[in-house]
Image (cartoon, rainbow, N blue to C red):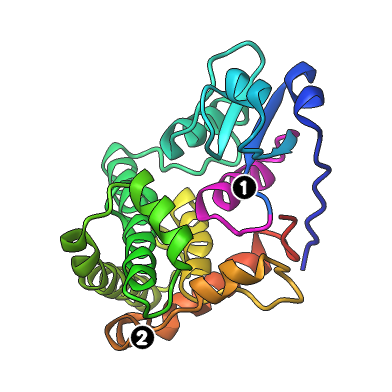
Amino acid sequence: MAVMHIAYASVEEAITAPGLRMVVVGGIPSPWSEAAKGIFRVKGIPWTAVRLAYDSKPLKEWAGQRNAPVAVYGDEPPRSGWAEILLLAERIAPAPPLLPADPADRALAFGLAHELVGEQGLAWSRRLQLVHAGLQGAGGFQPDVAAYIGRKYGYSPQAGAQAAQRVAGLLAMFAARLKAQRAAGSDYFLGAALTAVDIYAAAVLAMLRPLPHEVCAMDAGARAAFSFREPATDAALDDVLLEHRDRMYERHLALPLSL
């Protein structure tokens, strides 16, 4: 198993550094940040890491927002969307490709990725589920954290109440796809090789079953929140998904995580 070592720069160092830099969430295995790290790792792209500092005015002016991940390549505009960062990585290092060459398979890859890390996808819906649980006093995020995240990502009681059903439905869909792929002789979501979809799926599972502390020494409050369980989600979280997550870290990604 490969080991992840990331040297973090200060905001000032990152702003003046050449090449690729990326703002990432610190102390928490955010699926969006961890997936971007994984993409860069698989492609062998060198980059400078800087942790998100919400109170840093220079960071906000440089990155254009107080959020993460935000990738900045040379003098190009900042990129914060998962697809923007993926396409940037594909341009910087075309090999190994993480998107299929066939147009239909490429479209399917983007669709599956959106349902993992796009708006209303699995990670997005799980976040709303944890916000809803926290505001209901049933677990999930602590109430003050839940209120902040809820305001930022469009929480409403209706959206929160529907989130568990959305999470369960997506988990069932992804599990069914992996089982079909396994029956066809593949360990991956698309074809017979690693794609970005596999990396996103592995990263998102942190919000449902965090990796053990010895390989993911994360913020204790976040670990408690991500470990929130309820019957419908538990029933849909098939072992095939966790087995896939572990296989991707063993073969392609790196542990322990460097948060």
Q: Looking at the rendering, in which quadrant would you find the N terminus? A: bottom right
- Residue at 48 percent across and 59 percent down: it is 145
- Residue 223 painted magenta: no
The picture quadrant where one finds residue 92 is top right
Q: Are marks 1 and 2 in contact (CB under 8 Å)?
A: no
Residue 19 position in % (x across, y down): 72, 21
Residue 139 position in % (x across, y down): 42, 78
- Residue 31 painted magenta: yes
The picture quadrant where one finds residue 62 is top right
Q: CA distance from mark 1 to mark 2?
A: 27 Å
* Circle 1 residues within 10 Å: few <14, some 14–19, many ≥20: many
Q: Where residue 86 is drawn, which disc sits there?
A: none
Q: Nearer the viewer, residue 206 or 218?
A: 218
Count numbered badges in the picture. 2
Q: Nearer the viewer, residue 110 or 54?
A: 54
Residue 192: tell me if it is visible: no
The residue identified by callout 1 is 25
The picture quadrant where one finds residue 72 is top right
- Residue at 50 percent across and 71 percent down: it is 226
Taking 98 as reference, is 160 left or right? left
Q: Looking at the rendering, in which quadrant would you find the C terminus? A: bottom right
Q: Residue at the top extreme?
A: 75
Q: Amino acid at mark 1?
A: Val
The residue identified by callout 2 is 234
- Residue span colored magenta: 27-47
